[in-house]
Amino acid sequence: MQNTFHIFCRIVRTQLKGKRILSAAFSTNFARHMSPGNHTTEATQLAQALQANLKPLGVPSKMRADPAFKKIDTPEFQSIFTEELRALIDIFKRHNYELRIAGGAVRDIVMGLTPKDIDLATTATPDQMKEMFSKEDVRMINAKGEKHGTITPRIHNKENFEVTTLRIDVLTDGRHAEVQFTTDWQLDANRRDLTINSMFLGFDGTLYDYFYGFDDLLQRRVVFVGDPNVRIKEDYLRILRYFRFYGRIAREPSKHDAETLRAIRENVGGLARISGERIWTELQKIVVGNFGFELVQQMIAAGLAPYCGLPAEPNIDEFKRLCEDLANYSPPHLPILYLIALLHTSEDAMQLHQRLKLSAYERDLALFITQNRHKVDADFRTLRDFQRLCLQPYAKREYVEELLKYTNKFNLYHDLKSWKAPRFPLSGSMLKERGLAADKRMGVIMTRLRSIWIDSDFSLSGEELLEQHLQGVIEGLATPPATPNKKRKSQ
């Protein structure tokens, strides 16, 4: 009988080849009804055979027979019920559409945390929601999400809610997905990345958990829904999302699921297809979160470094040193500061910028620290040295403060933070009044006068600089060599 069943599964998969939506529907629903825990020994054997045949589709091998297995009534759950949310719930009830809390808000509530915002899922299609909200005179904003099934109503002109239609990923290319809408909550749960993110919560407190995400959350276990290889191929950014959620959920720094790590190593090349901005968004949260050092170390071991703009052999020892030293300083810390420690040179900083599309501030800070960290304790020792550095045209005070933090100069860092920088008493207009032209030469003169002012412990006035030092600075400027006349013919 099992042989017949194997043949049946192969026939069905062959017929559904290229029709991913039907494959997903067949896989998830059939597997649910054939769950081993609910049948006889013979049926259990058939269910096991079914799971083996459906594994290539990424169908979870473990599903609850009754996903609505628990009620929640906690202060964190009750805290979400604003007047606006209650009004939104009533609208969906009046129009006979189901509405539930989805994703991260469910996870937070189960963990005893008050969610910062809530995402909602519904059986209503975008067109049905637009018709419904129009009838209810509810304004809708942000039309960009509609193609993915998301409508954003603004209730009482006070609070926005993102409501997304249940959907199935029909086609994926590792970055984006073409979706088809459904009314099956389990099919929507099956397309999500991690079991802890695949739960729904009804407004009566009913927790809907199809893939044992609740159990994983209690055990602080981070695993993909079904086959991690399939889930990652649907969106390669899920590799980084895995590490981010591991830092948020796990109790131990290195208790990863072996199958998950294997799938990450096998698919790491797919990150080349992900934009630098999306990678940087995830990396920022990883490095400043729990187990930042251990997670980055694991990511490097899995081969992520080149795809994140890091050197082939990142400076992991310097990164470890920085992570330990930053414990001496009050958070928050800039995420870019952590990545700078993994770099060897300023060229590495530019490579990082090119991959991650850093902000101008982040790029310049990375360049400043990689170019000046080796000068600390050599060229820069005293508070006056760092104050002087703050006033250089190529530096910013914030950069110098981050440099001190990076090199763990605790006392100097706090002394500089409390220093009130004096104002340089000269301006370009004052030099113009002395007959100087507004050109590059003026900039050099201004820089040298500033240096003299700093050496005076900021005591010289503008008038003193002009009367006592301007002429000497001008005379000290090297006269540039005459440019040969290229048109002049040689004799």
Image (cartoon, grey):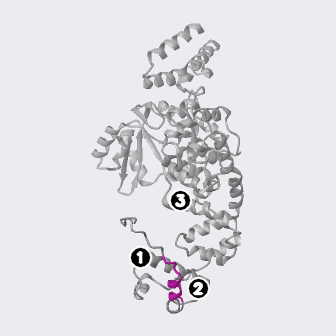
Residue identifier under label 2: 458
Q: Nearer the viewer, residue 459 or 123?
A: 459
Label drawn at residue 362: 3
Q: Nearer the viewer, mark 3 or mark 2?
A: 2
User: Where residue 23 sits in the image (x, y, percent)?
Assistant: 46, 22
Query: Please, is residue 39 above or below residue 371 in the view?
Result: above
Q: Nearer the viewer, residue 78 or 291?
A: 291
- Mark 2 is surrounded, within 10 Å at the Cα level, by few (under 14), some (14 to 19) or many (20 or more) other residues, namely some
| 89 inside magenta stretch | no
- Cα gap from disc 1 to disc 3, whole angstroms: 30 Å
User: Where residue 107 sits in the image (x, y, percent)?
Assistant: 57, 44
- The answer to which quarter of the image holds residue 50 is top right
Magenta span: helix, strand or loop, mainly?
A: helix
Which label's residue is closer to the chain start, 3 or 2? 3
Three-letter residue code for mark 1: Asp
- The quarter in which the C terminus is drawn is bottom left
- Cα gap from disc 3 to disc 2, whole angstroms: 30 Å
User: Where residue 396 sits in the image (x, y, percent)?
Assistant: 54, 70
Residue identifier under label 1: 439
Query: Please, is residue 245 above or below residue 462 in the view?
Result: above
**In percent of the image, x 49 and y 58: which residue is there?**
359
Residue 101 appears in the figure = yes
Q: Nearer the viewer, mark 1 or mark 2?
A: 1
Q: Which residues are magenta?
A: 469-479
Label drawn at residue 303: none
